[in-house]
Image (cartoon, grey):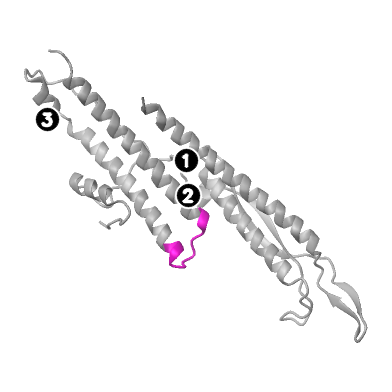
Amino acid sequence: MNVIPVLPAVTGSVGALRVAPDARVPREIPVPELQPLPRGDAAGESARTAAPAPFGEVLARMVGEVNERQLAAADKVQGLLGGREVSLHETMIALEEASVSFQLMVEVRNKLLESYQELMRMQV
Amino acid sequence: MIQLLGGIESTAAALASERVRMDVISQNIANASTLRGPDGRPYQRQQVVFESVLRDRMSGGGPGPAGATAVRVARVEPDPRPPRLVYDPLRGPIEVPNINVHEEMADLISSSRAFEANLAVLKTARSMAMQTLALGKR
């Protein structure tokens, strides 16, 4: 996988999630079936470990797509500065798309973390 | 790819087309007093013809409203108006290009305003997306 110089953190997290570089993203993200909650006793432990694999996959794919857009934007910038046939507005649009998708990813992460912390605060 | 900024392809195409139009106008202004072109004739004013094109045709069918159209430059064609005749004291009447610089300036203004309008669309789409994402914040 290429390395983006602008956002090293993204490549880092993508590497951690082991996303295939050519993971094509379907137009609709499949929503995994809701798994029944495991009937555990230790609420904290199960909440952390029982993340169903399909959802992780969805998340990984989303991170992969965000990364793809960042790479596309970086490519456009390189093309523009390198004198290839890339116009200024194309570059800016690619950058905007990258920024919006990144923001979306951050919001999803915030929501996930929020719900996790909400669960952890729950009185048993 | 999921579509985050809807309708952006039409806007991008419009921006590219307006760029071409501005390039042609600048070429016209630059050649406003070119008496001899490669063909030995005075420079002939060029004009851009836009056409709408089905967006699916351009991007291999992304999501979006069916039959959505973008714009592209159909062709750049010469202005059929004949060259003006100007009397030169030494050489008699000579042909000068059929270009009116004021007309070109008006075209340039309209082109730059069209570019601006498309940028405004882009900006609005971006701010709509960002405002929607701000729903998640508290």
Pinpoint the chain carrying mark 2: A
**What residue did someone put label 3 on?**
A49
Disc 1 is placed on an element classified as: loop
Q: Residue furthest left?
A: A41
Locate residue A17 relative to residue B123 in the image: left or right: left
Q: Where is A80 relative to A29, above or below?
A: below
Q: Amino acid at mark 3?
A: Thr
Disc 3 is placed on an element classified as: helix
Badge number at residue A93: 2
Q: Are marks 1 and 3 in contact (CB under 8 Å)?
A: no
* Image quarter hosting the N terminus of chain A: bottom left
- Examine the image and state in which quarter residue B95 appears: bottom right
> CA separation, marks 1 and 3?
35 Å
At x 81%, y 72%, the residue is: B97
Q: Are marks 1 and 2 in contact (CB under 8 Å)?
A: yes
Q: Position of residue B123 (x, y in %)?
A: 53, 42
Q: Where is B83 relative to B70, above or below?
A: below
Nearer the observer, B75 or A12:
A12
Badge number at residue A112: none
| Range of magenta residues | A79-89
Nearer the observer, B77 or A8:
A8
Total marks shown come to 3
Pinpoint the chain carrying mark 1: B
- Examine the image and state in which quarter residue A116 appears: top left
Q: Residues within 10 Å of mark 1 (few under 14, many from 20)?
A: some
**What residue did someone put label 1 on?**
B5
At x 84%, y 71%, the residue is: B83
